[in-house]
Image (cartoon, helix red, strand yellow):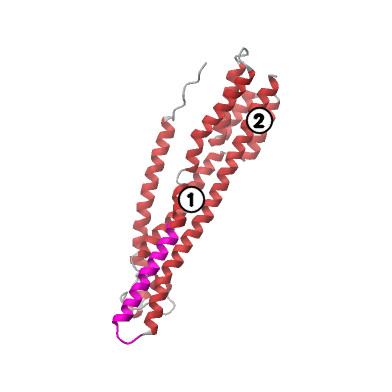
Amino acid sequence: MANAPKTTSPAKQESGNSGNLFASLAIVICFIVGIAVYKFVLGNPSNFIDNDPANQPLPGNYMGMMYHGGPVIPVLLALFLMVFVFALERFIVIGKASGTGNVGNFVRKVQTLLKTGSIDTAISECDKQKGSVANVIKAGLLKYKDVEANPGLDAEKSALAIQKEIEETTALEMPMLEKNLNVIATLVSIGTLTGLLGTVTGMIRAFSALATGGAPDSAKLANGISEALMCTATGIGTSTFAIVFYNILTAKIDKLTYSIDEAGFSIVQTYAANHK
C-alpha cells in the first residue's frame, strides 16, 4: 500500500512563520539599537574635548574614536548585536530539539528497549523526552508497530518502509534546526567587509582633510587613521564571534543528526534481525 505524501503540519508552518518574523524583527531592532548606541553612548559629549562631539576624542577614549569612525559604525554595531541575538535563538531552539534529557542516554535506552521488544515502552520514552530527536525516533517506532501488525508484508520492504519513515521525518525536523544559521554564516563575511569599507572611507576622509588643511598635522592624521581602524577592529570582532558561534551550533546539530541516525539504524536492524 502506497504511503500518503507527508505534508508540513500547521504547527510547523506556524513555527516557520514565527521564525521568519523573529529574523525580520531582530534585524530591525539590532539596527535601531546600533544607531542608539552610536548616538547616545559613543556620541556622549563626555567622550570628547570640551564636551563637544565635533572635537577630537579625549586621549585614550575609544568610544569617542569609534564615534568618529563614521556612519559605518552603527551598521557594524548592529551586525555585532545580530551575531549574539541569532546565536542565542539557535541555542534555545537546538536545546528544545534535544529534548528534556540527555540525548545519548535517551538513544541508548531506546536501543535497550528495542532489543527486549518493548516497542510501546520505547514510544513512551519518546513522549517523555520530546524534541526533534524523539519525534523522529517515535515516527520510526510507530512505523515499526504498523508493519509488525501486518505479518504478511515482505520483510525487506517493511524494513525499507521504516527507514523511509525515519528519513522523511528527519527531513521535516532538520530544517527547523538549521534555520537562521545562514544569517550567522553571512555575518562572517559581511562583518569583515563592512569593517574594511568603514576603514577605507575613514582613511579617505583623513587624507582629504590633510590635503585641504594646509600645513600637515601629524596628530590629526594619526587620530583620523586610528578612528578609521576602529571600523576594521569592530568588523573583525563581529566575524570572529560569528565563526565561533557558527561552528559550535553546527557541531550541536551534527551531534543530534548522529543520534537520529544511530537510533534509526538500530530500529531498522532490529526489525530485520527479528524477521529473517
Quadrant of residue 244 within the rendered picture: bottom right
Q: Is residue 265 visible?
A: yes
Name the kind of residue labelled 2 in the image: Ser
Say few, some or many: other residues with alpha carbon within 10 Å of mark 1 (under 14 / 14 to 19 / 20 or more).
Answer: few
Reply above or below: 89 against 76: above
* Mark identifier at residue 16: none
Predominant SS of the magenta segment: helix
- Residue at figure coordinates x 67%, y 33% from the top left: 109
Name the kind of residue labelled 1 in the image: Leu
Mark 2 sits on what residue?
Answer: 266
* Mark identifier at residue 88: 1
- Residue at figure coordinates x 60%, y 43% from the top left: 255
For label 1, the SS is: helix
> Which contiguous range is marked in magenta?
190-216
Reply above or below: 78 against 65: above
User: In the rendered image, which quarter contains the C terminus?
Assistant: top right
